[in-house]
Image (spheres, helix red, strand yellow):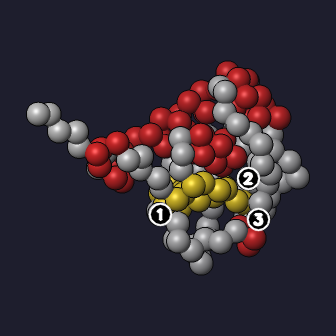
């Protein structure tokens, strides 16, 4: 008789906060991508913009990732407690009251080609997958 390890079938869910300055591009892409992988994710900025960047929304949509509910949020309006990881996107965010676990050092695609937005989205997806694997020893 062959046994199945049922624990290996349980999806691993990580609660992640992605932090940036404007919360209009990289952190929004990360939030949407992490959610698409079943994680509990939110994003926020120290100085949030007015709306999510149109090219960020475009490449997410092209990738089949749900963009509903994305909007720039202030770090002051987001509950930072209880997060498994708090990740800075690479904007040099300084948050003395928030323990940043990792800074991914991603270049801002704002003003760059649509190809660079696609590259950034793929890089974020890879970082999320690899990081969750590392954090959970999956």
Mark 2 touches mark 1? (CB < 8 Å): no
Residue with the most extreme front position: 1
**Residue 42 numbered mark, or none:** none
* Marks 2, 1: nearer the viewer: 1
Q: Quadrant of residue 97?
A: bottom right
Mark 3 touches mark 2? (CB < 8 Å): yes
Q: Is residue 123 above or below residue 44?
A: above
Secondary structure found at label 3: loop
Q: Is residue 80 left or right of residue 56?
A: left
To which residue does mark 3 refer? 74
To which residue does mark 2 refer? 23
Q: Is residue 46 above or below residue 137?
A: below
To which residue does mark 1 refer? 84
**Residue at image coords 53%, 71%:** 82
Q: CA distance from mark 1 to mark 3?
A: 19 Å
Q: Is residue 126 left or right of residue 19?
A: left
Q: CA distance from mark 3 to mark 2?
A: 8 Å
Mark 1 touches mark 3? (CB < 8 Å): no
Q: Does the image show residue 18?
A: no
Instruction: Give how far across and how far down residue 45 sits, in percent.
Output: 72, 60
Is 109 or 50 nearer to us in this picture? 50
* Marks 1, 3: nearer the viewer: 1
Residue with the most extreme left position: 1
Q: CA distance from mark 2 to mark 1?
A: 20 Å
Q: Does the image show residue 69?
A: yes
Counting residues from the start of the chain, the first of labels 1 and 3 encountered is 3
């Amino acid at each position: 008789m062959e046994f199945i390890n049922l624990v290996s079938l349980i999806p691993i869910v990580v609660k992640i906060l992605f932090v940036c300055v404007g919360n209009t591009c990289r952190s929004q892409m990360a939030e949407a991508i992490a959610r698409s992988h079943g994680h509990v994710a939110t994003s926020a900025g120290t100085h949030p913009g007015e709306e999510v960047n149109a090219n960020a929304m475009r490449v997410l949509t092209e990738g089949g990732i749900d963009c509903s509910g994305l909007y720039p949020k202030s770090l002051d309006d987001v509950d930072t407690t209880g997060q498994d990881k708090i990740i800075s996107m690479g904007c040099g965010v300084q948050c003395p009251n928030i323990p940043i676990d990792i800074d991914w050092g991603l270049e801002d695609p704002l003003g760059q080609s649509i190809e660079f937005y696609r590259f950034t989205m793929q890089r974020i997806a890879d970082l999320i997958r690899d990081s969750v694997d590392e954090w959970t020893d999956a």
